Amino acid sequence: MSHLKETKIDPASLVVTTIATTIAPTTLWEGIIRPSDLKVGRVFHIKGAGLITTHDANDMATITISLDGTTIITLQSPAGQVSDDAWHFKIFLTIRQTGAGGEISSHGDIYIVNETHNTMESFAADLSIQQPITLTCIWSDTDNSLKLTQCWIDEEA
C-alpha cells in the first residue's frame, strides 16, 4: 500500500495570489521537481484552492499547468456567474520513463460550480534535469477575479 510522504510547503507558496481584470496568462504559482525525485512509477500531486468571482454568466477561467514550459494539463471552469465561491483543483503526474527521453502522463480535475476533467495520456520531457512547474490562469473576459489561497505539490512514497 502506498502512502503520501510528508508535505512541505515552500514559504513562497503561502502567499495569496489574485488575478483580476486580465485576459493575459498570469502566473499563480511555481514549484520544482528535483531530478532525484523523478523515478519511474512515482506519482506527484499538485493541489490548490481559493475563491473565484465572475462578472457574468459567460465568463470562464482556464487554468494551465506547465512543466518546463510545456503544457501538461489544461482545465477550464464551466461558464457561470459566481461571487466569492470556493474552487479547487488536483492534478496527478505519473513518471513513466526517466532520463533525457522521459515520459509523463497527467490527469487533472477542477471544481468551480461543477467538476471538469482532462487527461494527457503521455508527453515527453527531459527528466534528467530539474523540472519547474508553473500554474497560470487566463480569463475569457475582463472584470473577473480568481484567488489562489493555497497550492502545493506532494508525492506518493
Image (cartoon, rainbow, N blue to C red):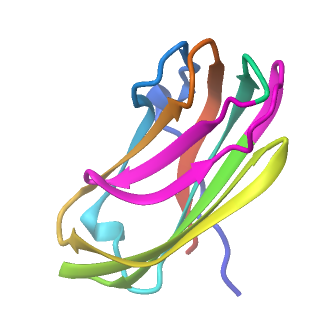
Asked if the magenta segment contains residue 70, the reply would be yes
* The C terminus lies in quadrant: bottom right
111 or 50, which is in the foreground?
111
Residue 34 point in image, percent of width and height: 30, 59
Part of the protein shown in magenta: 58-87
Q: Residue visible at 23% across and 58% down?
A: 130
Vertical order, 88 against 39 (above or below)? above
In the image as oriented, which residue stretches furthest toward the front?
58
* The N terminus lies in quadrant: bottom right
Q: Residue visible at 65% across and 35% down?
A: 60
Q: Quadrant of residue 49?
A: top right
Question: In the visual, does 151 lie left or right of 94?
Answer: right
Asked if the magenta segment contains residue 11, the reply would be no
Question: In the visual, does 24 lie left or right of 108?
Answer: left
9 or 112, which is in the foreground?
112
User: So how many labels did they put on this image?
Assistant: 0
Residue 138 point in image, percent of width and height: 49, 32
Vertical order, 29 against 14 (above or below)? below
Residue 92 point in image, percent of width and height: 57, 67
Vertical order, 106 against 19 (above or below)? below
Q: Residue visible at 53% across and 21% down?
A: 15
Residue 21 point in image, percent of width and height: 54, 12
Q: Quadrant of residue 117?
A: bottom right
